[in-house]
């Protein structure tokens, strides 16, 4: 009997240990990933570092640390069935107002909530929003806590007036299209037309004009200034949408707050865009930005979240589920692009297409023209195509050992610079020591002036090359003078 009891005791102990092990595995296999995906990304108190190495504490900025998540339409934030909206003032049918004041001091409440399929016209409003202590996904995806929230398929026209928010997650004007998160899929038709309005936000996660889930925003001659982290004046998030901006001035002062953050299709013309602490623009996933005759200036001197490079135009994929995988696009025609710190263009963890025509580009004294390489995100390749038409380019192009660049110089384009695979990030860490794949095409009329010995995988076209006392290695052959195929030497 004693032997049988001992066996039973041992069996019971083993069973308890097995159950305990399963409990630990469950906690780390289910609870911890959920925390990493859906809770940690929204907590504040993240330590950051500026260009001088000074550390500080801030909230988690958009364009920064985005942990892996479900694809668009799934996972956290893919379904609004558990979201409820409330407004200090609510409009639920066709209405016209003029000179009204809309105020909210309560957390998770809009100052003005418009939820109708009817047309609404708001002229010369005064909107004041306070209250709200955290910038959660409910604010970024669904517009909870915004100044003016528009949903339900309404076409809402806002003219003149002022909109100010001083709270966490308090976007000024929010257009929510309810397309269930599939990037740029057709939503319910919600459209915000806003013109001649002055907007000021101060809290983290508080953009100027915000568009998600297939909404549409058309903005004309706005003056927007944002002070908080993750507070792009022109901002989009999950589900994308369509944003068209004409004229106006758009200024950001916070960390992780580019002048434009796009997971959508964003077109801006004849506008002034200024970022005083972050990237000038940031494109995620299949987002796109098209600038025409705009003046864009950025002084990115803070590293936020996963980012390890200072840059002005950042194109990446976070794998958070906020934007679909695919090709990102940045197109700029005319105007000016001024990079005051870091690389002018930076591509990582995505496939990006950059199109430049007649842009006056001023690079920072220390940064590259373009870097294509690893950064703080993973899961995809680093691939870029740069198309320059009648464009003057200066500066080095850096391509990491596991990265790919296609460079096409068209029309009367000139590039003065060299290629390299030796890359050090903004934290002083070596990212690459060898050059990856670089294919260069010089169309007739275009010129490449070397500024150092460099290497490319292939060189084609009928343009010209100025060796300028340096060598160019194409594949396994090195040239210091003469033609390379149909590319002629010029001096």
Image (cartoon, rainbow, N blue to C red):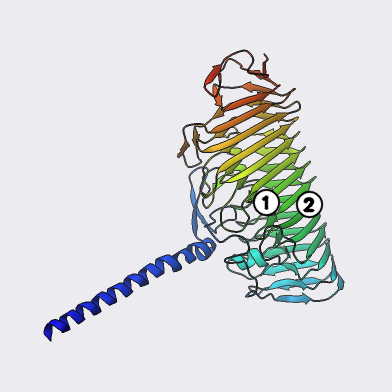
Determine the residue located farthest toward the bottom in the rendered image.
1
Is 130 or 191 nearer to us in this picture? 191
Q: Position of residue 187 (x, y in %)?
A: 74, 64
Disc 1 is placed on an element classified as loop
- Left or right relative to 388: residue 468: left
Which structural element holds mark 2? strand
Residue at numbered disc 1: 287
Mark 2 closeness class: few <14, some 14–19, many ≥20 residues within 10 Å: many
**125 is higher (above) or lower (below) than 479:** below
In the rendering, at what x and y percent does residue 52 appear? 50, 42
Marks 1 and 2 close (CB-CB < 8 Å): no
Query: For residue 467, what is the image quadrant?
Result: top right
Question: Which disc, if any, is residue 245?
Answer: 2
How many tags in the picture? 2
Q: Quadrant of the C terminus?
A: top right
Q: Of label 1 and label 2, which has the lower sequence position?
A: 2
State the separation of the CA atoms marked 1 and 2. 16 Å
Does residue 340 appear anywhere in the picture?
no
Q: Position of residue 266 (x, y in %)?
A: 73, 51
Tell me the residue at 73%/30% (across/down).
391
Image quadrant in which you'd find residue 445: top right
The answer to whether residue 92 is seen in the rendering is yes
Q: Nearer the viewer, residue 265 or 180?
A: 180
- Camera-near label (1 vs 2) is 1
| Nearest to the observer: residue 250 or residue 444 | 444
Position in image of residue 278 (x %, y %):
61, 48
Please determine whether, in this image, residue 155 is positioned above or below residue 488: below
Q: Quadrant of the N terminus?
A: bottom left
């Amino acid at each position: 009997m004693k032997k049988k009891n001992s066996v039973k005791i041992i069996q019971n102990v083993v069973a308890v240990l097995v159950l305990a092990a399963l409990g630990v595995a469950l906690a780390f296999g289910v609870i911890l990933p959920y925390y990493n995906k859906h809770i940690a990304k929204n907590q504040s108190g993240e330590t950051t570092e500026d260009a001088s190495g000074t550390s500080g504490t801030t909230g988690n900025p958009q364009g920064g640390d985005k942990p892996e998540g479900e694809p668009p339409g799934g996972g956290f934030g893919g379904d609004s069935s558990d979201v409820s909206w409330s407004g200090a003032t609510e409009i639920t049918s066709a209405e016209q107002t003029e000179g009204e004041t809309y105020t909210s001091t309560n957390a998770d409440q809009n100052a003005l909530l418009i939820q109708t399929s009817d047309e609404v016209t708001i002229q010369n409003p005064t909107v004041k929003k306070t209250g709200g202590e955290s910038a959660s996904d409910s604010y970024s995806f669904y517009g909870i806590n915004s100044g003016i929230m528009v949903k339900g398929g309404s076409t809402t026209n806002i003219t003149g007036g002022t909109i100010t928010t001083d709270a966490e997650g308090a976007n000024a004007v929010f257009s929510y299209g309810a397309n269930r998160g599939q990037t740029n899929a057709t939503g319910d038709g919600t459209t915000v037309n806003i013109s001649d309005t002055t907007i000021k936000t101060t809290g983290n996660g508080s953009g100027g004009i915000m568009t998600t889930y297939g909404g549409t925003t058309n903005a004309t001659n706005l003056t927007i200034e944002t002070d908080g982290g993750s507070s792009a004046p022109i901002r989009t998030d999950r589900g994308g949408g369509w944003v068209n901006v004409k004229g106006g001035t758009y200024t950001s002062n916070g960390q992780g707050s580019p002048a434009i953050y796009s997971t959508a299709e964003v077109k801006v013309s004849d506008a002034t865009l200024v970022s005083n602490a972050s990237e000038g623009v940031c494109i995620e996933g299949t987002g796109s930005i098209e600038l025409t005759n705009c003046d864009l200036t950025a002084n990115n001197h803070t590293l936020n979240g996963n980012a390890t490079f200072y840059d002005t135009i950042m194109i990446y994929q976070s794998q958070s589920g906020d934007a679909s995988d695919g090709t990102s696009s940045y197109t700029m025609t005319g105007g000016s692009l001024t990079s005051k710190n870091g690389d002018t263009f930076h591509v990582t963890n995505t496939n990006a297409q950059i199109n430049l025509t007649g842009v006056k580009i001023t690079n920072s004294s220390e940064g590259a023209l373009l870097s294509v390489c690893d950064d703080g995100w993973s899961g995809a390749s680093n691939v870029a195509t740069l198309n320059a038409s009648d464009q003057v380019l200066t500066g080095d192009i850096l391509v990491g050992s596991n990265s790919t660049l296609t460079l096409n110089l068209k029309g009367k384009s000139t590039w003065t610079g060299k290629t390299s695979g030796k890359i050090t990030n903004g934290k002083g860490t070596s990212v690459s020591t060898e050059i990856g794949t670089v294919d260069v095409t010089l169309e007739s009329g275009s010129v490449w002036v070397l500024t150092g010995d460099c290497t490319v995988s292939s060189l084609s076209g009928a343009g010209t090359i100025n060796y300028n006392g340096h060598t160019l290695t194409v594949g396994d052959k090195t040239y210091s003078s003469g033609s390379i195929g149909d590319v002629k030497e010029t001096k």
